[in-house]
Amino acid sequence: MAEARAVLRYVRMSPQKVRLVIDAIRGRGVSEAFTVLKYAPKAAAPVVEKVLHSAVANAARQELGEPESLTVSRAYVDGGPVLKRFQARAMGRANPIHKRTSHVTIVVSPAGKRS
Protein backbone atom coordinates (compact mmCIF):
# COMPACT_ATOMS: atom_id res chain seq x y z
CA MET A 1 0.00 0.00 0.00
CA ALA A 2 1.29 3.43 -0.91
CA GLU A 3 1.82 5.65 2.09
CA ALA A 4 4.36 8.07 3.47
CA ARG A 5 5.17 8.58 7.11
CA ALA A 6 7.07 10.98 9.30
CA VAL A 7 8.20 10.50 12.89
CA LEU A 8 9.35 13.11 15.39
CA ARG A 9 10.90 11.57 18.47
CA TYR A 10 11.72 12.90 21.94
CA VAL A 11 9.37 15.91 21.80
CA ARG A 12 9.49 17.60 25.22
CA MET A 13 5.70 17.55 25.66
CA SER A 14 3.35 15.25 27.50
CA PRO A 15 1.81 12.58 25.22
CA GLN A 16 -1.60 13.33 26.75
CA LYS A 17 -1.44 16.94 25.54
CA VAL A 18 -0.11 16.08 22.07
CA ARG A 19 -2.88 13.48 21.60
CA LEU A 20 -5.51 16.23 21.89
CA VAL A 21 -4.08 17.83 18.74
CA ILE A 22 -3.44 14.54 16.90
CA ASP A 23 -7.04 13.42 17.47
CA ALA A 24 -8.26 16.60 15.76
CA ILE A 25 -6.49 15.83 12.45
CA ARG A 26 -6.74 12.04 12.20
CA GLY A 27 -8.76 11.00 9.12
CA ARG A 28 -8.88 14.49 7.61
CA GLY A 29 -7.51 15.68 4.30
CA VAL A 30 -4.06 17.24 4.48
CA SER A 31 -5.20 20.76 3.55
CA GLU A 32 -7.98 20.61 6.15
CA ALA A 33 -5.53 19.28 8.74
CA PHE A 34 -3.18 22.22 8.13
CA THR A 35 -6.10 24.62 8.66
CA VAL A 36 -7.08 22.91 11.91
CA LEU A 37 -3.48 23.05 13.17
CA LYS A 38 -3.08 26.70 12.19
CA TYR A 39 -5.96 27.76 14.44
CA ALA A 40 -5.61 25.20 17.24
CA PRO A 41 -4.91 27.01 20.55
CA LYS A 42 -2.48 24.34 21.77
CA ALA A 43 1.28 24.43 22.21
CA ALA A 44 1.55 21.06 20.46
CA ALA A 45 -0.05 22.35 17.23
CA PRO A 46 3.17 23.78 15.68
CA VAL A 47 5.03 20.56 16.52
CA VAL A 48 2.37 18.38 14.88
CA GLU A 49 2.27 20.75 11.90
CA LYS A 50 6.02 20.26 11.44
CA VAL A 51 5.59 16.47 11.37
CA LEU A 52 2.69 16.76 8.91
CA HIS A 53 4.81 18.94 6.60
CA SER A 54 7.50 16.27 6.70
CA ALA A 55 5.01 13.49 5.90
CA VAL A 56 3.66 15.47 2.93
CA ALA A 57 7.21 16.09 1.69
CA ASN A 58 7.95 12.36 1.98
CA ALA A 59 4.78 11.63 -0.02
CA ALA A 60 5.89 14.06 -2.72
CA ARG A 61 9.27 12.35 -2.86
CA GLN A 62 7.54 8.98 -3.29
CA GLU A 63 5.26 10.54 -5.94
CA LEU A 64 2.02 9.57 -4.18
CA GLY A 65 0.11 12.49 -5.67
CA GLU A 66 -0.64 16.13 -4.99
CA PRO A 67 -0.78 17.27 -1.35
CA GLU A 68 -4.46 18.20 -1.80
CA SER A 69 -5.29 14.56 -2.62
CA LEU A 70 -3.62 13.12 0.50
CA THR A 71 -5.34 12.07 3.72
CA VAL A 72 -3.99 11.64 7.24
CA SER A 73 -4.64 7.91 7.36
CA ARG A 74 -2.91 7.23 10.70
CA ALA A 75 -1.64 9.54 13.41
CA TYR A 76 -0.59 8.52 16.87
CA VAL A 77 1.55 9.55 19.82
CA ASP A 78 3.61 7.20 21.94
CA GLY A 79 5.28 8.05 25.21
CA GLY A 80 9.02 8.55 25.19
CA PRO A 81 11.48 8.41 28.06
CA VAL A 82 10.54 10.31 31.21
CA LEU A 83 13.07 12.73 32.72
CA LYS A 84 12.82 12.32 36.47
CA ARG A 85 13.54 15.37 38.61
CA PHE A 86 12.89 16.37 42.20
CA GLN A 87 11.43 19.54 43.65
CA ALA A 88 12.56 20.57 47.10
CA ARG A 89 9.76 20.95 49.63
CA ALA A 90 9.48 22.04 53.23
CA MET A 91 11.28 20.29 56.09
CA GLY A 92 13.85 18.57 53.89
CA ARG A 93 11.35 16.66 51.80
CA ALA A 94 11.33 16.25 48.03
CA ASN A 95 8.54 15.63 45.53
CA PRO A 96 9.15 13.92 42.18
CA ILE A 97 8.61 15.76 38.91
CA HIS A 98 8.17 13.75 35.70
CA LYS A 99 9.10 15.64 32.55
CA ARG A 100 7.46 13.54 29.89
CA THR A 101 8.48 13.19 26.23
CA SER A 102 6.57 12.00 23.18
CA HIS A 103 7.12 10.24 19.87
CA VAL A 104 4.76 11.63 17.18
CA THR A 105 4.00 9.56 14.05
CA ILE A 106 1.87 10.71 11.11
CA VAL A 107 1.09 8.55 8.05
CA VAL A 108 -0.45 10.06 4.91
CA SER A 109 -1.85 8.15 1.96
CA PRO A 110 -3.87 8.92 -1.18
CA ALA A 111 -7.47 9.88 -0.39
CA GLY A 112 -9.12 6.60 -1.35
CA LYS A 113 -6.88 4.42 0.83
CA ARG A 114 -7.04 4.36 4.62
CA SER A 115 -5.37 1.89 6.93
Image: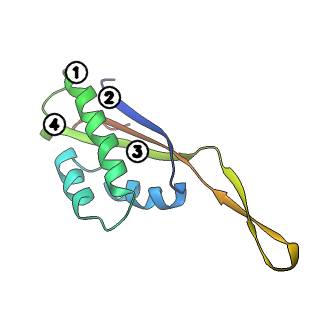
Residue that carries the numbered disc 3 in the rendered image: 75
Residue that carries the numbered disc 4 in the rendered image: 67
Contact (CB < 8 A) between labels 4 and 3?
no
- Distance, label 1 to label 2, CA atoms, is 9 Å
The one nearer the camera, 28 or 40, is 40
Circle 2 crowding by C-alpha within 10 Å: few under 14, some 14–19, many from 20: many
Looking at the picture, which amino acid does disc 2 mark?
Ala
- Distance, label 4 to label 2, CA atoms, is 12 Å
Q: In the image as oriented, which residue stretches furthest toward the top?
A: 62
The answer to whether residue 26 is visible is: no
Query: Residue 89 — which label?
Result: none
- Distance, label 4 to label 1, CA atoms, is 11 Å
Residue depicted at x 22% and y 21%:
61
Looking at the picture, which amino acid does disc 3 mark?
Ala
The quarter holding residue 20 reads bottom left
Q: Is residue 93 left or right of residue 76?
A: right
Q: Quadrant of the N terminus?
A: top left
The quarter holding residue 18 reads bottom left
Residue that carries the numbered disc 2 in the rendered image: 4
Of the residues under marks 4 and 1, which one precedes in the sequence? 1
As helix, strand or loop, the secondary structure at mark 4 comes to helix
Q: Quadrant of the C terminus?
A: top left
Of the residues under marks 4 and 3, which one precedes in the sequence? 4
Q: In the image as oriented, which residue stretches furthest toward the bottom?
A: 90
As helix, strand or loop, the secondary structure at mark 3 comes to strand
Residue that carries the numbered disc 1 in the rendered image: 61
As helix, strand or loop, the secondary structure at mark 1 comes to helix
Where does residue 102 sit, x and y in percent of width and height? 53, 47
Where does residue 28 sit, x and y in percent of width and height? 26, 50
